[in-house]
Image (cartoon, grey):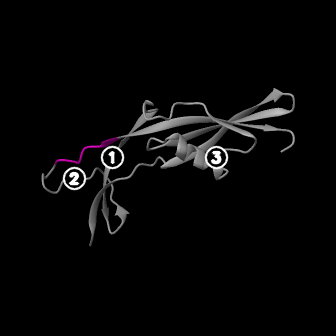
Amino acid sequence: MATKYVYRNDRPSLAVRCTGGASLGNCHDAMYYEIVSRVRLDAKRIRALWDAGFLGYGQSFMITSTCDGTEEPAGEDIVPCVEEIDGVPQPGPAMNPYMPGVPYEPMSQLYFRYTTEARVDSGD
């Protein structure tokens, strides 16, 4: 029987969501995307998501939020510690086996939010 104590965050490591679009006139449209990540992303990594087709398409792409390492976290998840026996989560808080009756403390995990804009003309 293998027992592990793990912190499993329900938030995905990376999530991309289209937040809307707009007609910019002269047959140009914009698509807006939000990226939520449990780690900081730099412009190179965000651009790789664009290159892979996850952030729309078109002639122009802009990152409209800070992504230079100085951005503030968008929020924080408080993640409880869970005891797993043979990969099966056990009910209740995970108790520290070295300090009987004392549960493991929850862990704070930050996440970051980035916004982008992709522009396309009617030719695409």
91 or 40, nearer to the observer = 40
User: Mark 3 to mark 2: distance in Å?
Assistant: 44 Å
Query: Label 2 sits on what residue type?
Result: Met
Q: Earlier in the sequence, mark 2 or mark 1?
A: 1
Badge 1 marks a residue whose secondary structure is loop
Up-down: is 114 above or below 104?
A: above
Q: Which residues are magenta?
A: 102-108
Q: Position of residue 76 (x, y in %)?
A: 40, 36
Q: Nearer the viewer, mark 3 or mark 2?
A: 3
Please name the residue shown 48% across and 42% down the image.
Answer: 41
Q: Nearer the viewer, mark 3 or mark 1?
A: 3
Please name the residue shown 49% across and 41% down the image.
Answer: 42
97 or 119, nearer to the observer = 119
Identify the residue under disc 3: 50
Q: Earlier in the sequence, mark 3 or mark 1?
A: 3
Residue 44 magenta: no
Q: Earlier in the sequence, mark 3 or mark 2?
A: 3
User: Mark 3 to mark 1: distance in Å?
Assistant: 34 Å
Residue 104 magenta: yes
Identify the residue under disc 2: 95
Q: Which quarter of the figure has residue 62?
A: top right
98 or 33, nearer to the observer = 33
Q: Do callouts 3 and 2 mark residues in contact (Cβ within 8 Å)?
A: no
Please name the residue shown 47% across and 46% down the image.
Answer: 11
Q: Nearer the viewer, mark 2 or mark 1?
A: 1
Q: Which quarter of the figure has residue 77?
A: top left
Q: Do callouts 2 and 1 mark residues in contact (Cβ within 8 Å)?
A: no
Q: Position of residue 89 (x, y in %)?
A: 36, 60
Image quadrant occupied by the C terminus: top right
